[in-house]
Image (spheres, rainbow, N blue to C red):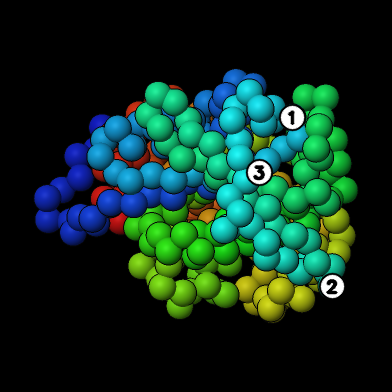
Amino acid sequence: IIINTNTIISAHIPRMDVNKVLYISQEIEPYLPASPLASFGKNLPQGVQELGAEVRTFMPRYGAINERRNQLHEVIRLSGMNIIIDDTDHPLIIKVATLQPTRLQVYFIDNDDYFLRHSPGVVETQSMPENNDERTIFFVRGVVETVKKLRWEPSIVHCTGWITSLTPLYLKTIYADDPAFRASKIVFSLFEDSFDGDLDARMVEKLRAEGFDDEKLKSLVDNDGNVDYKKLNKIAIDYSDAIVQSSENVDPEVLEYAKASGKPFLEYPGENNPDAYLEFYKSL
């Protein structure tokens, strides 16, 4: 099913009760400077919350974020667990802030190994790209474990940005029977947020250690063994319930792969159109 902004969703299609929406975002304004991705990370959750849904959103706690100015504070009851990646323990720290004027709760995934205390304005995905494979694993697992601790069961999980791309894989396999996500529909946004080069050559090996076999990782595994931006998007598409084109310019190969998947697909609905997203959620 491909839906465009002019499509009226027929009344005979069962409509999902969208009461809780979880947004997992790579960037959110104003915690990071304005960009298409950061503005989307702010505007869509706020817009959907204003339409009546209960919304929570997560992003990485990059070192470029000014904690004092943005009033971040640690949530002790959610922090403290260790996430093991490649046989190394990494403490999970959870911080929270309130995004005004809608009082949207924004949770931050933090860890000294992957996110610096201070940064001169460049996010760690760019300044420390050698850790991006573990950074995305840590971020995704940190979000999932925190939502479980919150005992909050989202009807929609909407992921934006390549750093979120492993979320559908985890939710549809390792956490498939978890009460927090068992009934969730997963939506993945295709965005113009690519990066050059490949992630660490051992990324697939590290994911195997997480419990995934090559069949589950087939979109990441090929003859060259490298993991690039396109492969991350493809594995997100494989395990998502629905796909949205959230920017005008998306990699053509990724866009074609999404449409060929046969999954519900929302064509680019414009820059700021929370009504179209909410209607799409309800149609799933």
Q: Toward the viewer: 148 or 232?
A: 148
**Helix, strand, or loop for circle 1?**
loop
Q: Which residue is mark 1?
A: 64
Residue drawn at x 84%, y 72% is 87
Which residue of the protein is positioned furthest toward the top in this rendering?
34
Residue drawn at x 12%, y 50% is 11
Closer to the chain start, of discs 1 and 2, is: 1
**Helix, strand, or loop for circle 2?**
loop
Specify the quadrant that holds the C terminus.
bottom left
Labelled disc at residue 121: none
Q: Which residue is mark 2?
A: 87
Residue drawn at x 52%, y 26% is 39
Where residue 213 appears, as percent x and y from the top left, is: 69, 79
Q: Quadrant of residue 197?
A: top right
Between the residue at mark 1 and the residue at mark 3, the CA separation in whole angstroms equals: 11 Å
**Helix, strand, or loop for circle 3?**
strand
Residue drawn at x 60%, y 27% is 70
Q: From this viewpoint, is residue 263 visible?
A: no
- Asked if residue 13 is positioned above or below residue 96 in the image, the reply reads below
Q: Which residue is mark 3?
A: 60
Q: Confirm or deny contact between disc 1 and disc 3 (CB under 8 A).
A: no
Q: Amino acid at mark 2?
A: Asp
Q: Confirm or deny contact between disc 3 and disc 2 (CB under 8 A).
A: no
Q: Toward the viewer: 215 or 200?
A: 200
Where residue 208 appears, as percent x and y from the top left, is: 75, 75
Between the residue at mark 3 and the residue at mark 2, the CA separation in whole angstroms equals: 22 Å
Q: Residues within 10 Å of mark 1 (few under 14, many from 20)?
A: some
Q: Amino acid at mark 3?
A: Pro
Q: Is residue 71 left or right of residue 243?
A: right
Where residue 264 appears, as percent x and y from the top left, is: 37, 53
Count how many numbered circles sit on residues in the image. 3
Closer to the chain start, of discs 3 and 2, is: 3
